[in-house]
Image (cartoon, rainbow, N blue to C red):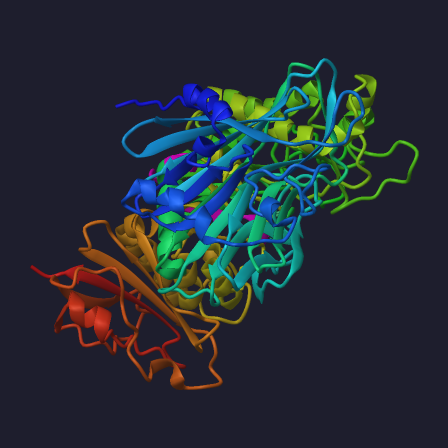
Amino acid sequence: MKYTYLLTALTSLLCISNSLIAQTFIPIETKDHAIVLQADKNNYLSMVYCGDRINEVKDYGAIAGMFKFSTDNAGSYNNAYTPAGTWSLSEPAIQVTHSDGNPSTDLKYVNYEATALDDNTSLTTIHLQDPLYKLAVNLFYKTWKNENVIEQWSEIVNNEKGPVVMQKYASANLFFSEKDFYLTSYQGEYLTEMQPQEEKLLQGNRVIESKLGTRAMLLGTPNFMVSFGKPADENSGKVLLGQLAWSGNYKLDFEIDSYKNLRLIAGINPYASAYTLAAGKSFKTPSLIYTISDNGTGRASRQLQSWARKYQVLDGEGERLTLLNNWEATYFNFNEQKLAALFKDAKNLGVDMFLLDDGWFGNKYPRNGDNAGLGDWQENEKKLPNGIGYLVKAAKDSGVKFGIWIEPEMVNPKSELYEKHLDWVIRQPERPEKYYRNQLVLDLTNPEVQDHVFGVVDNLFTKNPELAFIKWDCNAVIYNAYSAYLEKNKIPQTHLYVEYVNGLYKVLQRIRAKYPKAPMMLCSGGGGRGDYEILKYFTEFWPSDDTEPIERIFQQWNYSYFFPSITTDCHVTDWGKQPIKFRTDVASMGKLGFDIVASKLSENDLAYCKLAVKNYNGFKDIVWHGDQYRLASPYENPFASFMYVDKNKSNAIMFTYMHNTRVNEASERPVKLNGLDEDKKYAVKEINLYPGTRTTIDESKIYSGAFLMNVGINPDVNSRRTSVVLQVTESK
Ligand code: DGJ
């Protein structure tokens, strides 16, 4: 059922009576939570509440009156979209130079509409207007009731006679009036992505941002967690988990004001990105996506994971292909014979697909290392004389599907593409080139480059209709930001960072219009790309090149706050010293793949891998589509424990790893399970046993859900059993 509140009529009334306007409050509610905005007697719109939903809707109107922040500037702290240049002294959400050069903006509330889009989703649109200039801002709040998720974005509309220059144009501006906020942000580098850093926010502005250009994640990420009143906890307390869904430069401002309130402003990074908006045009910002939980981070991440699977990630509730990748098995050194042997390995392991990685292309400049050939997407005739079509068929004859690696946004200076199309390359023509992994970035603001990138994918699928999968890599950041295309078309260079990302989305939209479902994996020299906007076009992403399994336990733990396991590609490799069982069990908590030479494994190791793939096929539905519970944190224990439960609470799978063998406290206590039905009875069985080993778990016992959740079960991890996988099955 559709309904619309159009409050324009009420607004005109409000202009007559200032006392009435104080009653204009706008609740934006999910199943359990609400944020509330309110217009004051001067038509300034503020955010007055973020908390549990209050059943008596009219009570929201009394909230603002309970706060007495009295200093001169205090009235602007909770502005719903803080303008710059008038009376706010805080970090702005919007900063504009008007067509006449005036740098000041003021925004007044006009009206709002709330529309139910379906049983679960609603959209509230609030209209703001500068009283002096014909500049309007529309604020959008889309809610997913059952998942307690809110998506917020803005639209800036230039109705002035000439162009305006937007210096800052945030997606969202939130305000929280509790005291004591703890921010967890995720920092890192290549191989150490997604390291959490929790800090108490103090007065001033804490900025989390990226200037990488081509991608959001690497040195930092657009994912964050705000915990209210105390540090974040898995099962208690109010927390907000959020992400700016934008695949380029982002900026998150966490500003504590003089009253200890928190203002959060999230959006495209204004760094070098002043954006000229022509008369009559509007600009839609990316979305800030967040969920609120008053039961800690566990519930928050289950809400976000469930939302992502159902509504955001491409085919988020679908299936995925297990695979054998040749990157670490061969690097650039392969030929048809070697690959044919790997197809057989893939079949023998029992995975669905073989994935051919980097190195298959380039003739004038063969791709035999990372310093040449990138951009020349023709099969290398020496390595692959019979082309990709032959490989797709040979893989099929061996009983597996075939997938392929590309990095279509990039170019090596040693390539025919670079020689032919220097003007397609992002570079400062007068300065020496600076490379990241020996490569440069193509200028996706240029429609010809968009055609080229689309063409790389389109050619592969057109020539090889049975191609099953694409791994889309993106290894370089933007150095020497300068676009020949923008220059030629008299578009300001400060549009480059924004239009690069828009160009990428345009290409992806074309790909999905033609190939709606083909599975594609995002990769970015490690965990550089995996935000929710780009995941509309991709089925999964690569969290990190670091596949050492103990590091992976921590990384997968951290990614899981924001992403469901079905999106997280985890490969078994030769990294580290852990046995194959440990490595395979850790990878089984995401989308399982292998990147090893299976034929070189010992007989038992190979037998173990085959068993693990078979078992994975039995429980992958729970890992991919079930609810995840983080039972024991590797940061607080010498072990870590994760659990996945199906929707009926009938089947669960629990993974426990000992990551620190210095102390022997791993098996002292039981681990409490979660998410089961306390009245159901369950059997517990250990699976993924290495050949020749026996379980130490008593599998004859039947436990109540209440027992398993209040007392727990002891997986008995110790230095001889460093990885234990338990299957929990309802016993009827
Ligand atoms: C970086 C990726 O993370 C690796 O998995 C591999 O695909 C290489 N690129 C290939 O160049």
**At 43% across and 25% down in the image, what residue appears?**
516
Residue 458: give x, y in percent of width and height: 55, 22
Q: Residue shown at 36%/49% (left/top)? A: 303
Q: Residue 580, located in which quarter of the rendered image?
A: bottom left
Q: In which quarter of the image is the N terminus?
A: top left
Q: In this view, does 211 lie above or below 710?
A: above
Give the residue at x 66% y 53%: 207
Foreground pick, 88 / 138: 88
Percent x, y of residue 234: 39, 64
> In the rendered structure, does residue 328 fall within the stretch colored magenta?
yes
* Chain part drawn in magenta: 311-330
Q: 570 left or right of 270?
A: left
Relative side of 366 to 246, left or right: right
Residue 274 appears in view: yes
Q: Position of residue 8 (x, y in %)?
A: 44, 20
Foreground residue among 124 and 282: 124
